[in-house]
Image (tube, rainbow, N blue to C red):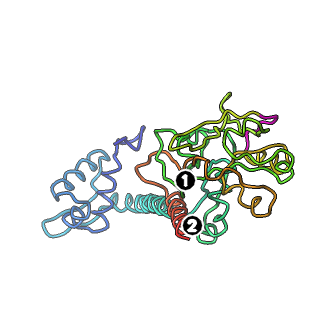
Amino acid sequence: MPDLNDKGPQVSLPALVAFERVARRLNFARAASELDVTPTAISKTIKILEGQLNVRLFNRTTRSVGLTEHGSQLLSTLAPALDLIRTSVQQIGETAAKPSGVLRINTSHVAFASVIQPFQAEFLRRFPEMTLEVSMESRMVDIVAGGFDAGIRMGHAVQRDMVAVPLGAIQRMVVVGSPAYIEERGIPSRPKDLLGHACIRLRFADPGRYLEWRFKSRDKLVVIEVRGPLVHSDMRCVLEAARQGVGLAFVFRQFAEDSIRRGELLALLERQCAPADTFHLYYPHRARMPGKLRAFIDFMQEKNRERQAS
């Protein structure tokens, strides 16, 4: 334990805590019991403290214990300081366990729209002392260096040194196109027909990496190397380009659901599309998880269980 004073008497904090407990109780045995040490140990600690300060702190007889003038002076200044320390430590513990404060999440727009957006209003109503701060970007970031509490991405993209919690079911994929495009170019009946269509590709942040157009064929996985006039790095832009009739897009079914329901896009090759992955919430391993993050994880898992049951 470091000494509290570099210039005056070299005094340790445990010795001061022991003194304060004996001074409050005026009973060595009771103070020793509360501190979970022996009376002999606490008596020795007080003697060492008195030697360090070069004063007597207690008047002791076989029947009673009393404070000296120096002991009373030390207690009058030490007790409030120790009470303040105890209060501060207690408040930190309560804050860590309590769902409050700012929760910073890093994710992509697609993950936000699929996982967080449908439930964010209910989450904030349930935890009014929390602020949810969502940062959306297509590239993967170091959430620790960026000061984020957690991230949400596809499971395959999560770093292995992170704790990952799955959120929801495996995402379904679908090929979509606008009615105008389909009327002009026709409906692809097989995945390989896509080679004759204008396809809008999604590029990842890593140069040269594109979202694969993957399909099922007799229990085998087939990747179609599509081509097209347009590449975007955000699925929102890919979806909007498909609505404009630029070409066909390969997107998450749930992300395109509203456009399909409104008739802006037609769903194609649904049975042949291979599923993607599951969104995962991930965070650094911690011995003690902050209450705000635990509340968010529990809430999101609850909402996804309800969604899958419906």
Q: Nearer the viewer, residue 274 or 138?
A: 274
Question: Quick one: quadrant of the C terminus?
Answer: bottom right
Query: Which numbered marker is on residue 99?
Result: none
Residue 307 is labelled as 2
Q: Disc 1 designates what residue?
A: 170
Q: In terms of secondary structure, where does tag 2 sit?
A: helix
**What segment carries the magenta color?**
228-234
Q: Amino acid at mark 2?
A: Arg
Front residue of 199 and 298: 199
**Mark earlier in primary sequence (2, 1):** 1
The spot of residue 284 in percent (x, y) is 49, 45
Q: Position of residue 194 (x, y in %)?
A: 72, 39
Residue lying at 50% horizontally and 44% vertically, measured from the top left: 219
Q: How many marks?
A: 2
Q: Cα distance, mark 2 to mark 1?
A: 13 Å
Q: Is residue 106 left or right of residue 235?
A: left
Q: Nearer the viewer, residue 167 or 181?
A: 181
Q: Identify the amino acid type marked 1.
A: Ile
Percent x, y of residue 180: 87, 51
Q: Quadrant of residue 81?
A: bottom left
Q: Residues within 10 Å of mark 2 (few under 14, many from 20)?
A: few
**How dense is the environment of label 1, judged by Cα within 10 Å: few (below 14), some, or many (20 and up)?**
some
The vertical placement of 158 against 170, above or below, is above
When asked about the image quadrant of residue 253, the answer is: bottom right
Residue 183 located left or right of residue 125 = right
Percent from the top left, x then y, of residue 251? 69, 48
231 with respect to 125 (left or right) = right
The verdict on residue 147 being magenta is no
Q: Residue at x 40, y 41 (%)?
A: 8
In the rendered structure, the answer to whether residue 252 lies left or right of residue 43 reads right
